[in-house]
Image (cartoon, coloured by chain):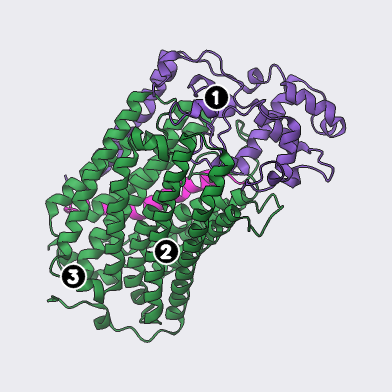
Amino acid sequence: MSATAAIAGVHGESLVNYKLIKSHLFAGALFLTVSMVAGYLYSLQFLGFYPLQDSWTHSPGHFRLLHTNMVAYGWLVNGFTAMLYYVVPRLTGKKVLSDKLGVLIFWAWQLIMVLAIGGYMTDKAQAIEWGETPTGFRPGTFELNYVPVDALVVVGAVLVILQFMTPLFQAREQRFYVTLWYITAGLVWLALTYLMGNIMPEWMLPGAAGAAVTGLFIHDLVGLYVTPMGWGMMYFFVPLILRKPIWSHSLSVIGFWALAFFYPLGGVHHFLISPIPDYVEFGAITTTIAIEVVVTTVVVNFFMTLRGKWSALRSSMAIRWFYVGAVFYFITCFQCAFQVTWMFQKVIHFTDWVVGHAHLIMFGVFTFWLFGVIEWLWPRVCRRNWYSQSLRGWHFWLWSVGVLIMFFDLMIAGLVHGFMQRDLNDWSDILRTAEPFWWVRTFSGAMILAGLFCVIYNMYMTAKAGEAYEEEKHLIPLNAD
Amino acid sequence: MERFSTLVFVAGIGCFAIAFLLSMIFPWMSLYGYHGMDYQTLEQLAEKPSREFVELSQKFPESFREHYGEVSQASYAEALQRGRDVYVGQACWHCHSQYVRVVSNEHVRWGAPSSAQEYQNALNQPHLWGTRRVGPDLARTGGKKSNDWHIAHFINPKSVVPHSVMPPYPFYFDEKGVPGKDGIALITYLQWLGTVQAGIPVADRITP
């Protein structure tokens, strides 16, 4: 049986636990809301309109921690776990380890998120960027001062790995479809990355050597968890929804192995022109540029798959999210290849350029792709058609235009800031110049928030009051174009 | 190539290990193996309490005695560590970087470029380099501004820097501006930053 036939096979249906998918998607959307509201509040501080002044628990810095960490652990982890519950049983032909374990993982993970939020709000964050989940220990000692959230995350991750590695292991005699390569390796990488990033700099490596590891951690979390899950997801859902096989199997082989080899080598590029030895920096720069080649193979593969089915961009919302995300993906990675050089770093490091870059990749790409999946999966999970067609459109356009405005605004702001800093302008002048850019950023944030409310409301109403589900309405014709 | 074990062991563990070797083991070896840099514990850093710490004890004797007792190596160490904890907890390091590069005229603006040695101590574990500069870099801030400036700035940043976007932190001070335990700690920590600069290994300096 070919890979595509396995994907399309309806007999996979009985292996999938839709209840868990629904719970994870809903919890993910909830934490995405928390994250976005936090980010919006934080942006108001830059304009002088921060509403929760004069409280040590609600200070803007805490909302920044909430914003970045909830996107990673609250939203993306929940979203990708939901995706795994759908994809892994269908591709392996085996059930996940246990449905009861699934319920445990679900509640444990949401509890961990709530504990993490409590930690950020009470000054317990760990000094690891994007891994601020509290260690629970007073820094430098082994005295407990909070719940050891880090350890709980590790337990949670181990349970997730057990849950999905079991069917993968049972299917080990089969030839794996590319999606499963990404998922198998991604699950191993998730555990290794989290352990490395949260243990080594905190307990073993001070200063510059620790910085090299935290750089690697930030990078690996994107490159070895989010990216493999995202690409794996795309390799599954794009052929499934388009109802045709992926264009080139060989290109997907190259893409996978090049990602596995080159991606983790680029970690140190988060701290360039720093006390980390130069040869390590040069290695990171070279491999980061090499990643651009990898990305191109993947993007080409997806666009060649779409050839002959262009009308799907109009008829399928999911495809539309996927391919707009793929265009953004190419833009971000293209930007990567330049901004990683010292020539660019001199100017753009420490500025809003990087913030814009991060938003385009985490929001414009992976969040878009996950919402493409939600577009397709939510009616099937709820057995109801989407409640409102126009809200789906509003959601798409508010987010696409919003993130583009934010990206270009922050990119220009970063250049202005960088050059003013180099030219020794007074710091107050730099802030004054940045102000209009920050207004535009907050405005684009409002667009994104509005889009979010559209989709949350639509998801809720679909689950509550959508019309009965009709499969035909959700399939694009086999012989389109 | 497309089997479970290849994916787990070669891609999963193997590729991760190569990256780990290159981005962790190698820098660690060349930084600490080659230069033999010494690690300074908190007690060593706190050996000689700073001028600013002493001044805080004289200016706010009641608050100081209540929270830290006398000026000593132990009380200085306690204030430094607590200051760092607040700095981390309030996410200060997400808007203030702590390293000076040799490019973009940063040595002119902030002071001597950062070297690996100065981060080899307990108060840089983990390091607080940061990745964004909304506010100025703080790697060389110790001693540049007076304690009074810091107090005024924390209570209302706009009172001393008109266009500042920094949030106010009045809750670390009482209504007369007397710093509490966290206020003293934060100022002590800030006044310490950049004061460790001994034995910079020349090989680690980068030419612009």
Q: Which mark is residue A402?
A: 2
Tell which subunit mark 3 falls on. Answer: A
Residues at marks 2 and 3, CA–CA distance in whole angstroms: 24 Å
Chain identity for the colour purple used in the image: B
Task: Kindly identify the amino acid type of the residue bearing the numbered disc 1.
Answer: Gly
SS assignment at label 3: loop
SS assignment at label 2: helix
Q: Which segment is the magenta one? A: A147-176
Residue furthest right as drawn:
B62
Say if residue A344 shows up in the picture: yes
Callout in the foreground (2, 3) = 2
Residue tagged 3: A310
Residue tagged 1: B111
Residues at marks 2 and 1, CA–CA distance in whole angstroms: 40 Å
Pick the residue in front: B70 or A279: A279
Say if residue A93 shows up in the picture: no
- In contact (CB < 8 Å): disc 2 and disc 1: no
Where residue B192 sits: x, y (%)?
A: 65, 26
Where residue A67 sits: x, y (%)?
A: 52, 54
Are callouts 2 and 3 both on one chain?
A: yes
Chain identity for the colour green used in the image: A
Q: Is residue A94 left or right of residue B135?
A: left
SS assignment at label 1: loop
Residues at marks 1 and 3, CA–CA distance in whole angstroms: 57 Å
Tell which subunit mark 2 falls on. Answer: A
Q: Is residue B149 left or right of residue A257?
A: right
Quarter in which the N terminus of chain B is drawn = top left
Q: Is residue A279 left or right of residue B194?
A: left
Characterize the local packing of mark 1: few (<14), some (14-19) or many (20 or more) Cα atoms within 10 angstroms.
some
Pick the residue in front: A227 or A451: A451
Q: Write down the quadrant of residue A303 in the picture.
A: bottom left
Q: Which mark is residue A184?
A: none
